[in-house]
Amino acid sequence: MAQQFLLLGQTLEFMTSPFETPPEDAARHRTHGAILVRDGKIMAVGEAPELTAAHPQVPRIEMGDKLLLPGFVDAHMHYPQTPMIASWGKQLIDWLNTYTFPQEAKFGDPDYARTVADTTLDLALDNGTTTQVSYCTIHPQSVDAYFAAAAQRNMAVVAGKTCMDRNAPENLRDTAQSAYDDSNALLSKWHGVGRASYAITPRFSPTSTPEQLEALGALWAKHPQCLMQTHLSEQLAEIDWVQSLYPDARDYLDTYEAFGLLGARGVYGHAIHLSPREVDRLSETGAGLVHCPTSNTFIGSGLFDMAGLVARHIPVGLATDTGGGSSFSMLRVMAASYEIGQLNGTALHPAQLLWLATQGSANVLHMGDQIGGLQVGSMADIVALDLAATPVIAQRRAMANNIWQALFPTIMMGDDRSIAGVWIAGEKAR
Ligand code: GUN
Ligand code: ZN
């Protein structure tokens, strides 16, 4: 017997990107909507009276006026940094040396790694995040721990061993050869197993020798179905450092391109301070960017040019970048993205914010046909959002005249209290 149920509530489905049409035309809202879930997948989305009449025997889960959405997709974070989130007073390079590297050094211990992986994925689910993309540490055990914890929750995750062979403490350095061998072995072990995807993960150009970048470029060429994730142009001091370490490079992006690390399945975090040439190359190659606004303000990095980059048809997703980012909530990330847009002169529409945190992130990961939307055939990774989770949000929502006005106070002021239910592949997780 097929496992099936009807989930009843308000629904919001994107038909197209709200960056390519007037945002309010991009989505269909139903006040009394329903989602038919069968064997972990979405089989139909429609009006509740029609779907209940068509499937009278199917059990129903009544969510009232909660808003049913695809689960959030956090497209860039560092699970090993969960315990050191909100560390005070440093910018990127000092922050890495002072807080991050000592923390990541603990992940040679597989039990510790598993504990932090469990905590991180539970925090994700508490916050309505159903897919997470994580850097691990240089230790292969840290990758095993994370994928095992995600498999236990049946979550679709992307992760990889972080590779560093210079400018990091001795106990956090691999080599070009061991980075290749360990990444290759982990990729063979985990990629495509259950809902796991492997991403080849050089941390960023300053912590890799040219030899290591070349080795990982060769690995990617051998496994082009995998994603490759790294960091790009986050802070000005970092960019100067990259230029001094790679004197022949035309710019930061060129340090990746020169070693075969630029492509459509490349996922580049931050990408704030880009030259026109870099924007051209990103646009030409179809590479994806991940905007991490809570991190960009917390570490003092700068303002991501959402409007300019989207106008060049560069895929963009959203992420927490924990522990550079200071919240596990993708609602808080959407709010920060709105604030940065305001500082750049572009107020993003709630439809655009929501799309970035779901379909936009999924598209950057080339997983948009499976997650990030409520399309028929997508996995039933679903969140039910309470649009009146606190008194102040409730009184603002009571003033709303349409779904976007009703949603915006939750985007700006919501947190894990706004998450009224989470389903992973059709199984209730929260
Ligand atoms: N650049 C290289 N490593 C990191 C990291 O761990 N966090 C952030 N925010 N930027 C980085
Ligand atoms: Zn990062």
Image: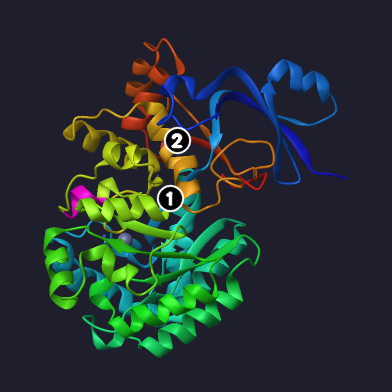
Residues in magenta, as a range: 295-299
Residue on which the image places disc 2: 355
Q: Where on the picture, by quarter, is residue 38?
A: top right
Quarter of the image where one finds residue 102: bottom left
Quadrant including the N terminus: top right
Q: Is 252 situated above or below 346?
A: below
Image coordinates for residue 100, horizontal then vertical, percent: 25, 70
Report x, y in % for residue 172: 30, 83
Please provide percent x and percent y for residue 80.
37, 68
Residue type at mark 2 is Trp
| Residue 99: x %, y % from top left | 21, 69
Judging from the image, what secondary structure is the residue with disc 1 in?
A: strand
Tell me if 378 is positioned left or right of 66 in this view: right
Q: What residue type is disc 1 on? A: Asp
Residue located 17% across and 53% down the image? 301
* Ligand 2 within 8 angstroms of badge 2 C-beta: no
Q: In terms of secondary structure, where does tag 2 sit?
A: helix
Q: From the viewer's perspective, tell me whether residue 251 is left or right of residue 124.
A: left
CA gap between label 1 and label 2 equals 12 Å
Which numbered marker is on residue 74?
1
